[in-house]
Amino acid sequence: MLRNDVLSALQQYDAAGARRALQALANEYRDDDVLVYFGSVVNALEGRSTVPFDCHEAALRARQALSREVQPAVARVFPGQSGATWLAPLWAELAGRAAALPFGAEHADAHAAPLFLLAARWAEASDAISRIASWRRIPAPLCWMTEARYRLDGLDAAWPLLVELAWLSPSRFDQLLSRLDDACVNRLRRAFDTSFEGAGDIGDLAWFPAWVLTDKTGLAPLFRLAEPSRQNAPERAAKVILGLLSLERQGRHHELLETRRELQTLNAALYAAYMKTR
């Protein structure tokens, strides 16, 4: 019953009431295992603030405290997804406090956008990212915007950004796929992992968009919306396959053969995957 009193106050974000209930629980059951978890959560409530951060380091410290100390305690206190829901307003407060801090690659986690994502405030995250100059050419904000677009509008809307992210940063692309846990993309990823003969490292994921086009040609219109990135070999291969799909529809056989040779030169494994469906 005393535990429930603490939980009830926490659910209403009542810091003073939670502290009183926690003290009553400690007075009666000083060896209760949950005291330390309750204590961390109550401390977080008491430490809430709306004062803007004056530097990136302060924002990073607050983020680390919430993720390393408070989040594990919340997971013990509130089971399942309810913990993430309870934490959302605290993440949103940190995002608001970080709103005036400019983006810097060396302290990207201090920016408001990833904090808004943790708060499941997708529209605010998108707005914050859109104010970063050249965000589409920088791995971190491109990754954030891809997630925001997916959460707001679904997979079809996110595909062009997913393609660009795979070209620009295969490692961030890999991490994002784990967070999104989209059934369609997961099936493609598993098939890619088992069939594509690459270097065997995370860099292979840069070839994922081109490989997808060999298996799901219907995605070509969405992939064409991807903007130019680094013009590396995986990106050029995807553009070549898009060209091949157009040539196939138009029946231009001479150009088709030349373009196939170009694909073979770029990546023999990708060429084999393409030819397997022809």
Image: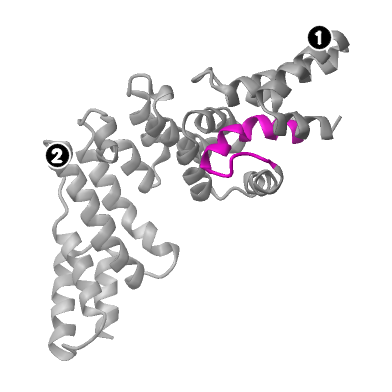
Which quarter shows the N terminus? bottom left
Q: In 3D space, how far apart are the residues under numbered discs 1 and 2 (Cα atoms)? A: 58 Å
**Residue 30 location (% of width, % of height):** 16, 88
Q: Which mark is drawn over residue 23?
A: none
Residue 221 is drawn in which quadrant? top right
The residue under label 1 is which amino acid type? Glu
User: Is residue 184 a member of the stretch shown in magenta?
Assistant: no
- Mark 1 lies on residue: 255
- In the image, residue 139 above or below residue 237: below
Let me know if residue 241 appears in the view: no
Q: Crowding near pointer 1: few (<14 within 10 Å), some, many (20+)?
A: some
- Mark 2 lies on residue: 53
Q: Which residues are magenta?
A: 196-216
The residue under label 2 is which amino acid type? Phe
Q: Which residue is at a point 23% across and 52% down the rendered structure image?
A: 64
Magenta stretch, overall SS? helix
In the displayed structure, does residue 169 sit left or right of residue 38?
right
Viewer-proximal residue, 264 or 59? 264
Q: Which residue is at a point 58% across and 44% down the rendered structure image?
A: 200
In the displayed structure, does residue 37 sit left or right of residue 175?
left
Q: Which residue is at a point 14% across and 72% down the rendered structure image?
A: 19
**Residue 228 location (% of width, % of height):** 53, 17
* Colouring scheme, one of rainbow, by chain, secondary structure, one colour: one colour
Q: SS class of the residue under badge 1?
A: helix
Residue 139 is drawn in which quadrant? top left
Viewer-proximal residue, 210 or 98? 210
**Residue 46 location (% of width, % of height):** 14, 60
- In the image, residue 201 above or below residue 218: below
Question: If you read the primary sequence from the N terminus, does the residue marked by circle 1 or circle 2 appear first?
Answer: 2
